[in-house]
Amino acid sequence: MRIVVKVGTSTLTHATGRMDIRHVETLCKVLSDIKNAGHEVVLVSSGAIGMGVGKLNLTQRPSDMPTKQAAAAVGQCELMYVYDKLFASYNHTVAQILLTGEDLRDDVRHRNFANTLQRLLELGALPVINENDTVSTDEIAVGDNDTLGALVAVSVKADLLIVLSDIDGLYTADPRHDPSARLIPEVREITPEMDAGAGGGGTALSTGGMHTKLIAARICMDAGTDMVILNGSRPALLYDILDGQAVGTRFIGRKNT
Ligand code: GLU
C-alpha cells in the first residue's frame, strides 16, 4: 500500500515546544517497520514552527510573520535532523520536500513535485513534506498541514491518508467537555452537524483541530481516497489500520461505480 501519514505539532512536541521524544521515536520506529514490510510511506510533518519556538527559547508561538518564518527556519532543520537520525538508525533514507499552495496550484510545479515524489518512492526514500513556512505568506500558503496532507495523498494517488491527532477520532461531541460523546468509527458523508461540532481548533503551538481535518477528509473523499484519523500518541495503531482493523475514524472515499 501507498500511505501518506500526517503528523501534527501536538503529537511531535510538548506544550513547551520541546520535542516529545517518546512519540517521535515510536513514530519513526513504526513507520520504518511499515516500510520494511513493503509499504510506501510519505510523511507530512508539522512541527517546524513549534520546534523553532522551543529552540529559540521563545515564550509562545509567534504571531508576527517574520518571527514565525524565522522559527520555522530553525525548527525545520531540527525536525529533519531528528528524522534523519532516527530513520537512519533503521536504515531508511529521508528526503525533505517543502511546498507552498502555489506549488500545488500551478500545473508545471505540481507536475515537477509529483514526478520527484514518485522517483523518491521508487528509490526507496521516505519523503518528509511540510509547508515551506519561511516563504509562505497567507496568500500563497496551503495554510495547514491537514489540508496539505490531503492534497499530497490525492496527488500521489495514495491508498490511504492517516492523520495522527491528539484525539482518537471524530466524536459526536467534544469528549473533553461532554461525557456522552461517542467516537464515530466510519463516515461516508460529512454532515452539517459534524461541521458544527468541529469548532475551531489547535493548541497553543499548532494550527489544525477538527475543522481542518474535515476539510482534509472532504478533499480525500471527493477524490475517492480513504482517510483515517488516529491518536498520534499511539503510533502502533498504524499496524492495526494496515491489518484492516477498525480504529479511529475512517472517512470512506467516494468510489465511482
Ligand atoms: N507548517 C507548520 C509547521 O511546520 C504547521 C502547519 C500545521 O500544523 O497545520 O510548524
Image (tube, grey):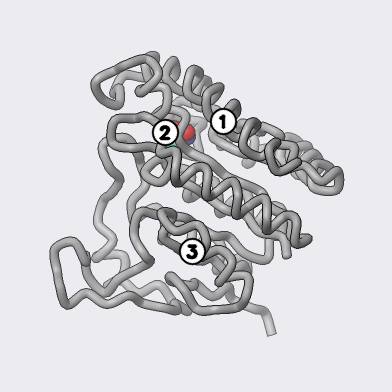
Is 7 situated above or below 14? below
Classed neighbour count for the residue bearing mark 3: other residues with Cα under 10 Å, few (<14), some (14–19), many (≥20): many
Which residue is found at the position 37% from the left and 29% from the top? 18
User: Badge 1 is on which residue?
Assistant: 82
| Alpha carbon separation for disc pair 3 and 2 | 31 Å
User: Badge 2 is on which residue?
Assistant: 19
Q: Quadrant of the N terminus?
A: bottom right
Q: Quadrant of the C terminus?
A: bottom right
Amino acid bearing label 2: Met
| Alpha carbon separation for disc pair 3 and 1 | 32 Å
Is 194 situated above or below 162? below
Horizontal and vertical percent for residue 59? 24, 20
* Ligand number 1: quarter of image: top left
Front residue (pair 56, 235): 235
Which residue is found at the position 61% from the left and 37% from the top? 86
Which residue is found at the position 44% from the left and 15% from the top? 70
Horizontal and vertical percent for residue 60? 25, 24
Element assignment for label 2: loop
Given contact means CB atoms under 8 Å apart, are the residues at marks 2 and 1 in contact?
A: yes
Horizontal and vertical percent for residue 134? 51, 20
Amino acid bearing label 1: Val
Upstream in sequence: badge 3 or badge 1:
1
Is 69 situated above or below 220? above
User: Badge 3 is on which residue?
Assistant: 218
Upstream in sequence: badge 3 or badge 2:
2
* Visible residue check, residue 25: yes
Horizontal and vertical percent for residue 81? 59, 26
Upstream in sequence: badge 2 or badge 1:
2
Amino acid bearing label 3: Arg
Element assignment for label 3: helix
Given contact means CB atoms under 8 Å apart, are the residues at marks 3 and 2 in contact?
A: no
Tally of marks: 3
